[in-house]
Image (cartoon, helix red, strand yellow):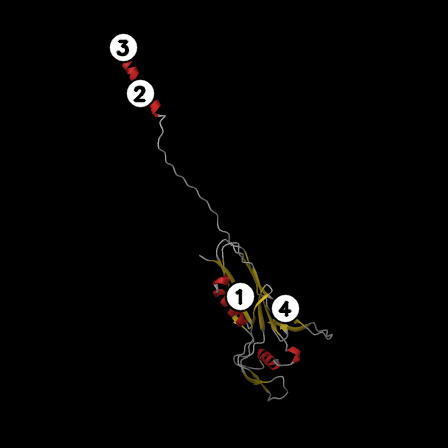
Amino acid sequence: MKKSRLLAGLLIMTMLSTCIISGTFAKYVTEASGKDSARVAKWGVQLTVNANNFAKEYVTDDTTGTDIGVSVKADEKVVAPGTSSAETGCQATFAISGSPEVVTKVQINLSDVKDVYLPAGEYKDYTSASADAKFTVPTGGYYPVVWTLKQGENTLVTGKLADIKTYLDAYNADKSKCTYSANQSLAASFTLDWAWDFDAAGAGTNDKADTLLGNVAAGTATVEGAVTAIGYSLTVTATQVD
């Protein structure tokens, strides 16, 4: 009996020592983990458009001592010979700013274009006392208002309003001009001016056409195809490129 108890005790001790020894052996272990984070890419593009190009009144340029301070006055915005946007400070301006962290395309769209225009042809000369006096507008017609688009101080294009639109359409189609790399500054400012100048040195070259246009606007003359309205719509858009 004592021998059985002794054998049982030895067996228990052996099992305990085996468990203790087996806990000290090395073993294979494999582990993997991952972690990531991000933020929204910066956009921050700002666009400003001020299309206030015309006025109801224009001051006189007469320096002969006249007391008349206003050369043109109407109940709605108008243009007239001798007036300009610079005269009233009515420049159209638009600007782009920002350095987005994405590729960006800028589009400058001019639409609904209307420009003062007198078609080519022979017309009554309202500047003459003779009822039979005529004058001729040559091929291409007469566009009295000259427009100028600038970027900063750099003149981009001068001519008819349609010429400004043609330039901007070409800009919009040229990826090298209208597409900006990620983090590239979009900073640019533009001005759109116009002027309806009197003839140099009072030569009167365009007085006949100007007077006829004024009479068409007043309803005292009719010319098929003549345009006495002027204006446009301007939209500037910045879009992320995929």
Q: Say which quarter of the image contains residue 186.
A: bottom right
Of label 1 and label 3, which has the lower sequence position?
A: 3
Q: Which residue is mark 1?
A: 234
Q: Amino acid at mark 2?
A: Met
Q: In the rendered structure, which disc, 4 or 1, sits on the residue that comes first in sequence?
A: 4
| Label drawn at residue 15 | 2
| Three-letter amino acid code of the residue under disc 3 | Lys
Earlier along the polypeptide chain: callout 4 or callout 3?
A: 3
Whether residue 134 is situated above or below residue 72 in the rendered picture: below
Residue drawn at point x = 26 percent, y = 13 percent: 4
Q: Type of residue at label 1?
A: Leu
Q: Residue furthest front?
A: 26
- What percent of the width, then of the height, locates residue 132? 59, 89
Q: Indicate which label's residue lies in the foreground, 1 or 3.
A: 3
* Mark nearer the N terminus (1 vs 2): 2
Q: Is residue 129 above or below residue 197?
A: below
Q: CA distance from mark 2 to mark 4?
A: 105 Å
Instruction: Kindly state the secondary structure of the residue where label 4 is placed.
Output: helix
The answer to whether residue 106 of the structure is visible from this angle is no
Can you identify the residue that label 3 sits on? 2
